[in-house]
Amino acid sequence: MDNAFAALPPAFYTRLMPTPLPAPYFVAASAPAAALIGLDAARLAEPDYVALLSGNAVAERSMPLSAVYSGHQFGVWAGQLGDGRAILLGDIATADGPMELQLKGAGATPYSRMGDGRAVLRSSIREFLCSEAMAALGIPTSRALSIMGSQQGIMRETVETAAVVTRMAPSFVRFGSFEHWFYRKQPDELKILADYVIDSFYPHLRAASNPYQALLAEVCVRTAHMIAQWQAVGFMHGVMNTDNMSILGLTLDYGPFGFMEAFDAEHICNHTDQQGRYSYANQPQVGHWNCYALGQALLPLIGEVALAQAALDSYQPAFAEKMNALLRAKLGLQTSQDDDTQLFDSMFALMQANHVDFTNFFRALSTLQVAAPEHDTVLRDMFIDRPAFDTWAAQYRARLRQEHSVDAERQAAMNQVNPKYVLRNYLAQVAIEKAQQQDYTEVATLLEVLQKPFDEQPEHQHYAALPPDWASHLEVSCSS
């Protein structure tokens, strides 16, 4: 294990050792994530790996550290933040480049801001499962290698038990990492960080006439594409602060996230977000706002406001193009037509009016037969206003006829982009409650289901069911 980030000047981080976790034990591991760094997930339950991945032992040459950064939280400048409960162990070489390993919940750091630096089992399970679920959906994301638990009591709203998640990403540098040096008026450190990111992750940008403008444009496009992918599966991040935005366009920092169930464009998945800043409908524009915050931070390097604005102008067309392509795929359309936007907008208006389950609707839509409206029973029964569905379905069928769409071919294609299984909050809650009784089998089973989200998996059909009544009382917040 090496640590390229540790080669930056000491101002960028604090070197420290993880705080040992009392009597750690294995909870779960992801085989696909382990394979990325050449490990066998089955071995992660062995004592040596449990010690390493709980922070009780440190690999040679890892040079553990916690990074400093700042950020805007809920649109307000929050000043210095940093890795309050995360410790970067270092990076491991892979065929696709270095992969950093970070322990979340490994004890207090200088950036903990009166916190204990620990993570609880509940939030650790949520992050572990969602990281791997998003990867299986094909959405750019940090990965989760493992969870190690402990019976150590941790005080949140109530006393919970501690856990450590091992997260992986090529880099955990954030928008807020750049904001930190901009607002501190330290242009030398700002340039060092930008050069590190370009040389390590965007080396092709060195050939640009203005590499820092090119960096901003690249990050804008990656961020726009990522958020379009969120919207297409109904994913809501919940806390899109600039310190939670990846400079690589990865989904980062899973806290009060949620997947849309009964469709409501204004849905707020984060109970802490009283103003709805991070609602489903607002995510695209918040992503754009965050890119502006990054552009502001990079302005001393870019040099001219007009150049920064030109880079920022790439966000909206990139989002629109990606979103339209994803929606065409979700509806099984093979061509782009001028009236596609009207078809999409009327579909979402219909879903909104009837609060149709997002995931189940798109999955069932593949069963529609162009020449047989009489077979629409399953789809029609998702809607309270069935005549309104019939009207939209007639419009959709007309669009399919223009393309001479073949039912079987379209269904196969749609089922490769419309998942049957997503991490619904109630599914995570069931796994959490069993794990709190030291039964980790549901975590493993749910992980297995979520790693194949597009497969039918008839033996796991119940994981695609609508949420039970008790699930309406579940709330997640920034403490999640």
Image (spheres, rainbow, N blue to C red):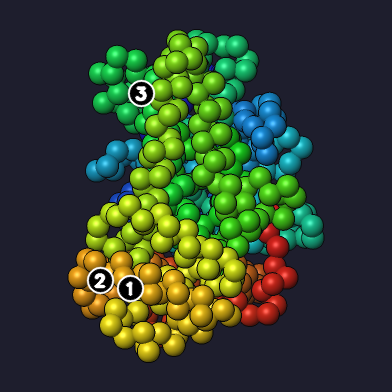
Q: Is residue 3 above or below residue 390?
A: above
Task: Report the disc number at residue 397.
Answer: 1
Amino acid type at image mark 1 = Arg
Amino acid type at image mark 3 = Ala
Q: Residue at x 72, y 44 (%)?
A: 116
- Which label's residue is closer to the chain start, 3 or 2? 3
- Which label's residue is closer to the chain start, 3 or 1? 3
Task: Report the disc number at residue 401.
Answer: 2
Does residue 133 appear left or right of residue 93 in this picture? right
Task: Report the disc number at residue 449.
Answer: none
Q: Secondary structure at mark 2?
A: helix
User: Toward the viewer: 205 or 304?
Assistant: 304
Where residue 192 appears, x then y in whole percent? 45, 16
Residue of label 3: 214
Q: Secondary structure at mark 3?
A: helix
Q: Residues within 10 Å of mark 1 (few under 14, many from 20)?
A: some
User: Toward the viewer: 265 or 413?
Assistant: 265
Does residue 15 appear left or right of residue 115 in this picture? left
Whether label 2 touches label 1, CB < 8 Å: yes
Discs 3/2, front = 2
Discs 3/1, front = 1
Q: For residue 132, which quarter of the picture?
A: bottom left
Q: Residue at x 33, y 59 (%)?
A: 328
Q: Measure how far apart labels 3 and 2 are at the Cα level.
A: 43 Å
The quadrant the C terminus occupies is bottom right
Q: For residue 425, which quarter of the picture?
A: bottom right
User: Toward the viewer: 253 or 360?
Assistant: 360
Q: Is residue 379 above or below residue 154?
A: below
**Whether residue 333 can be seen here:** yes
